Amino acid sequence: MLRFSKTTTGTVLFALDALLILAAWPSVLWMSRLDVLDLFIIPTDSRGLDYPILDLLLLFAMGMYRREAILEAGRSLSRVPLVVGMGAAMAILVSLIQPAFVPTASMPGGRDQAMLFGLAVVTFTFCAFLARLIIDVMVRRHVLRRRLLIVGAGQRAWDLLHMLSREGASLHDDVTLVHDIEEDVDPRLLAERPDRIFCPPDFDVAAVAIRVDADLIIVAPEERRGMNLERLLDCKKAGFPVIQYLSFVEREIRRIDLKRMELGWLVYTDGFTFNAFDRFLKRGFDLVVSSIVLLLTAPLILGGMLAIRWEGPGSVFYRQERVTQDGKVFWIMKLRTMRVNAEAHGAVWAKEKDNRITKAGNFLRRARIDELPQLVNILRGEMSFVGPRPERPIFVKELTEKIPLYNERHMVKAGLTGWAQINYPYGASIDDARSKLSYDLYYVKNFSILFDFVILLQTLRVVLWPAGVR
């Protein structure tokens, strides 16, 4: 049985998309009698290459490789033509502005552009449909399954199985559990999979790993003190990778499990390091991206201002105190979306279908236009383009008292978008704040410019297909 122990289903789907496009696109261009040499060999004219590169980039940015997109195949397939069309349109835009930056590049004719656009949309849509059909067959036949061996059979093991079923990067895991004779077994595990729980003599985990041909061993007991580490070392010597529970959750779910958090793990694992060069790159990234976005969205901001003014009196901008890096307080700028006296009785959490929001404000929020003036905060250095969402001082004080490690999110500047925003859109309660913190801590711990770029790309998905806005 072919197994992908270290490869997620989304990664396999991306590889299929890329392989099908690379196989189909040159053939389509050749059959259409376009100059293949000019399109693929001459480096100063990348008209043919722009289309597949931007197609894959847009598929990624729109979340077409995420777990939920693969599971909801019908909805994903309905979105494929739109995403492919957006990628082809971007390729046309790139080809039009390319001669301004590459003097030796030629301006393609209108007929060639129209033909390339049509060929790209049809070809890439077909490739995307075929790739998703292949993935669906592979998932149904359990080709992409992983064989996981969990050391522990208590509540922590149950929580891990629950997270894997809802958020795991792989759509099918073949899970076996092994526990010490002194450890209590969670009754829910006994009810659901009694035939997959083993208690080997002398805690011989390696023997069970060999028996089930495990791809990965996850150490997740309720209590690690007193555990026979020599048995786990036997597993490593036998060639089985061994990973601690919190590290596996971080790698697999891409967030920090606050429920089972151990400060010792945070201290001894990699992360939470920011050198001067990292900060220099991030600031440069902020200045360049925010300037470009502010220039491109200026008409939207102006339109929003006119809509607010048309609806009634009051300031078009809304300024409010927020907390950023190192707990510093600054005044955030937004387009006003609530009534002028919305908080006459004090600060309150935002709510879904909040009756304080105006009609124009409702549209501005759904389109995310109300957030755009924060680009000025980024240029001032008060915020970053990517980072934890800035909260109000009164809420930060409350959350710090109730949620451990909440202040650690302030190790970096607050952001216009962020890892929590694209993965957990709502944040209107203590529980929501705790869930969002698990993503914020993951971002702070694993910060990199490349990660910022990934988040920025996937923000397009949230803007175009929002799961909800408050």
Image: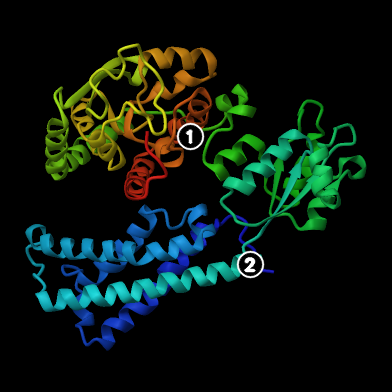
Occupied quadrant, residue 381: top left
Residue 220 visible in rendering: yes
In the shown orientation, is residue 431 left or right of residue 44?
right
Residue 211 horizontal/vertical position (percent)? 82, 57
Position of residue 145 relative to residue 34, above or below, is above
Question: Mark 2 — residue?
Answer: 140
In the shown orientation, is residue 240 left or right of residue 98?
right
Question: Mark 1 — residue?
Answer: 439
In the shown orientation, is residue 363 left or right of residue 77?
left
Query: For the residue labelled by badge 1, is the local secondary structure a helix, a strand or a loop?
Result: helix
Query: Looking at this view, is 417 or 5 the one in front?
Result: 417
Position of residue 143 relative to residue 189, above or below, is below
- Mark nearer the viewer, 1 or 2: 2
**What residue is shown at x 39% (from left), y 18% (from top)?**
348
Decide which of tag 1 and tag 2 comes sooner along the chain.
Answer: 2
Residue 90 horizontal/vertical position (percent)? 22, 61
